[in-house]
Amino acid sequence: MIVALIAVLVFSARPAATAMQPSETCQRRCGDIDIPYPFGIGPGCHLETGDWTFVLSCNRTADGRHRVYNYKIEVLDMSVRLGQLRIWNFINPWCYNGTTREMNDQNNWWYNMSITNFRINDAQNRFTVIGCNSLAYIRSLNETTDKYMTGCMAMCPAAGRLENGSCAGVGCCQTAIPSGLNAYQVSFEEKFNTSGIANFSPCSYAVLVEAAAFDFRTTYVTTDEFMTASGGQVPLVLDWAIGNQTCEEAKRNASAYACVSSNSECVDSMYGRGRGYLCNCSAGYEGNPYLLNSCQDINECEDERFNYPCSVPGTCTNTIGSFYCSCPDKTTGNAYNGTCEENKSQIGWQIAIGVSSGVVVLIVTASCLYMIHEKRRLAKIKTEYFKQHGGLQLFEEMKSRQGLSFTLFTQEELEVATNKFDERNVIGKGGNGTVYRGTTKDDETVAIKKCRLANERQKKEFGKEMLILSQINHRNIVKLYGCCLEVEVPMLVYKYMPNGTLYRLIHARRDGPRVPFSLRLKIAHQAAEALAYLHSWASPPIIHGDVKASNILLDEDYTAKVSDFGASTVAPTDEAQLVTFVQGTCGYLDPEYMRTCKLTDKSDVYSFGVVLLELLTCRKALNLEELEEEKYLSSQFLLVLGEDRLGEILDEQVKGEQSFELLEQVAELAKQCLEMASDKRPSMRQVAEELDRLSRLSQHPSGRQNSKEILALLGGLPSTTSKVEVSSTKNISSTDTADIGIRSPR
């Protein structure tokens, strides 16, 4: 079986779409398939968009039939009105040799439609797996930050359990796909096979297929009927659009705007900004909006395709783009959805008018009363939410404390700032809420977070904790401007950080140089200073609870700002308060915290140690695509460090910038933060002081000297009179109130 490859051709740059019109001599039918513009066969017959989207060919196949192709894809049909194209998609088989029970080599298929503006319709298609004990995966190949991968497994407990038409996991399974997919890979899990199972086919199949065109048969699992009956192909629905501009952007260039018919309108692609647009005839019109004067009025009164629009026969009058229903002369009534009757006496009219007027007055009065009731009810709900979240306590504290810079925003103010929380304004999502970018009425750009509250205790203490956070004034903690408490889920308003998160700074670029290690150490030192402040000098002390790279923001000068206090808590004053439910982010969670359910300041130290590892290695804290023993960065780091193989895990750029001795010291600091027992970990104040020393050393002009010189700079040779103690236990110990002891480098 040859690897199925839908498209591999790389296009050179070509002009943007032009509002050309096809020649009357263009071929508009191939075999039994109509070819509407903007699709076409040959130059001048299709819309030029610089890619293969609308380029078709009519080929005569071996069976003597004429078939339509888009590059190498056979086309079933196409729709201008729906903006869709149906194609034949190859079934991916995976068979076993019945003699040797060895797998075929082709258990992976790649599909790439990136040379077109097609997207696979996620509503009408399903990833389908057929077989016995067969597990297949589908993953996206798009070069974006949005990665996708899912699997589907078909089990076969016994042949008698199979059922025609049922694709729910026995012999057949189906799963949904994400929106916007245009390049993907299909692969089978080699651990599962059907070799040696009696009464079942040795082949498994995986394919993206139009759900409405697929009907499971039990013989698909017991024989090779699925391949033979379908010819190895099944229908697949694609969505298409024009270019990569929005309607607003395309209209600015009249020569390139494709909606050329009068009575037509432009619609942005459902896949979001930068994914093109479609043209539709306006309501009441039909035709091809891509052709001049093609959208013509629909005669709703006579067109047999439409049900007669009026309830009374003979009362419909067609208008341009619409219609109306009117009762004949000397009759009255409602021709739209009622009856037409002969005129009554003047008295009857007066009675009818009087009754109608009374009904209108009653309806208007009832509507006004209902609106007043609803307004009061909503105001009451907002007041209850405000009290529930500690708003009254917060308001009283604000009045009693002069000079407190903290604002209580209304729900309406934040809706205006975010355009009613438009998805296009989302700048981040996490376990503790969604963050939107917004602009206040003072034209200040802010970050607005809609929180997720975990329990009733947090609801009651929310206002109190907001008051505490509002008083934190530290250069490395993001500024909290205010909050909104009159909603079910409170919202926080922070200062906007233009350079995003430390996570994006470390992991966004796959190729090319990353930020220098000296800047990484500087950011780490600033974040450590912020956490040390929260632990030691905030009143009362605060435990962050969710320290990770994505919660360290960067301002315009790349100064670190610790953010996201959704999992934070005031340091407990007794042991009973320590017990809580475990929350945080996998890969950063303190093992002792997960085991004992006791959150302490040393839990933040452990999480910060994982952040140090990300800075050293440029690897993610948790990578589910790796092998089991390499999924967690902390476990992998401790393993190579224990085997004296630190160099294998370090970022290559870091090794080229700094001396290995300095990197060993940073690694040793991270190791001490990752101690399983919290009492063996250093405090955040000790970590901050050590990072301050290492950060200054990383910028020293002699940072790449020989080992003895580096040892002298890092803490002195063992024979010197330095205040730094060389510890053989690899734990930070202090012989002075301001100095931290580190293990001697190798």
Image (tube, grey):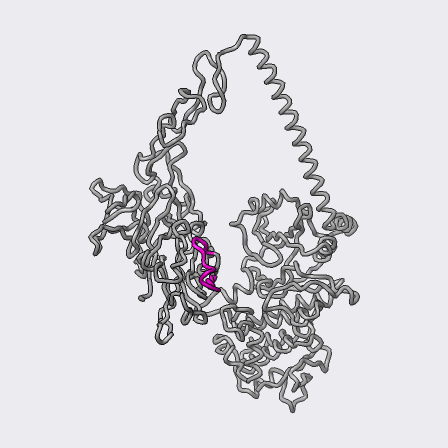
Within the magenta stretch, is there residue 151?
Answer: yes
Q: Is residue 638 visible?
A: yes
Left or right, residue 735 beside residue 437: right
Q: Where residue 155 sits: x, y (%)?
A: 47, 63
Q: Residue at x 36, y 68 (%)?
A: 95
Q: Residue furthest bottom?
A: 719
From what the image shows, is residue 453 above or below residue 717? above
* Residue 685 or residue 569, whichever sits in front: 569
Report whether 427 appears left or right of 544. Answer: left
Image quarter (top left, top right, bottom left or bottom right) of the C terminus: bottom right
Task: Point out the stretch of residues depicted in magenta.
Answer: 149-167
| Residue 220 in picture, x, y percent from top left | 38, 59
Tell whether 686 sits left or right of 637.
right
Instruction: Using the image, determine if residue 687 lies above or below residue 289.
Output: below
Residue at point 54%, 78% (across, down): 701
Pick the front one: 60 or 297? 60
